[in-house]
Amino acid sequence: MPTSDAEGKDWSLARFERHLPDTVCVVGPGEGTYAKLFRPVHQGVWWTAVEVHKPYVAKYKLRSTKTR
């Protein structure tokens, strides 16, 4: 599974902290890098993930929120 580049995580986190959204839509959730980064900052966010590469859904158990 492709992973996110380390560059820009601090910038993204600063924007998230500034706005503290109650809902987030992630296109290409991958390993859940951004969810892991943002969740401790603002709990109770409703996360929606869109994975366009269908084989990843089963291979990486993306339907199971318990493992994400």
Image (spheres, grey):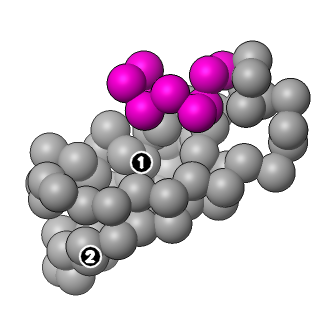
x and y percent of residue 10 in the render?
32, 56
Q: Please give the label number shown on residue 21.
A: 2
Residue drawn 86% across the image and 29% down it: 55
x and y percent of residue 21 in the render?
26, 76
* Residue 18 left/right relative to 8: left
Describe the element under mark 2 as helix, strand or loop: loop
**Most frequent secondary structure within the magenta stretch:** loop
Residue bounds of the magenta highlight: 60-68
Please name which of the two marks, 1 or 2, marks the residue nearer to the observer: 2
The C terminus is located in which quarter?
top left
Amino acid type of the residue tagged 1 in the rendering: Tyr
Residue drawn 14% across the image and 45% down it: 40
Amino acid type of the residue tagged 2 in the rendering: Pro
Vertical arrangement, residue 43 with respect to residue 67, above or below: below
Answer whether residue 63 is magenta in the image: yes
Q: Is residue 57 visible?
A: yes
Instruction: In this rendered view, identify the residue nearer to me: 30 or 68.
Output: 68
The answer to which of marks 1 and 2 sits earlier in the sequence is 2
Identify the residue under disc 1.
34
x and y percent of residue 1 in the render?
73, 25
* Residue 48 left/right relative to 29: left
* Residue 12 left/right relative to 21: right
Answer whether residue 67 is magenta in the image: yes
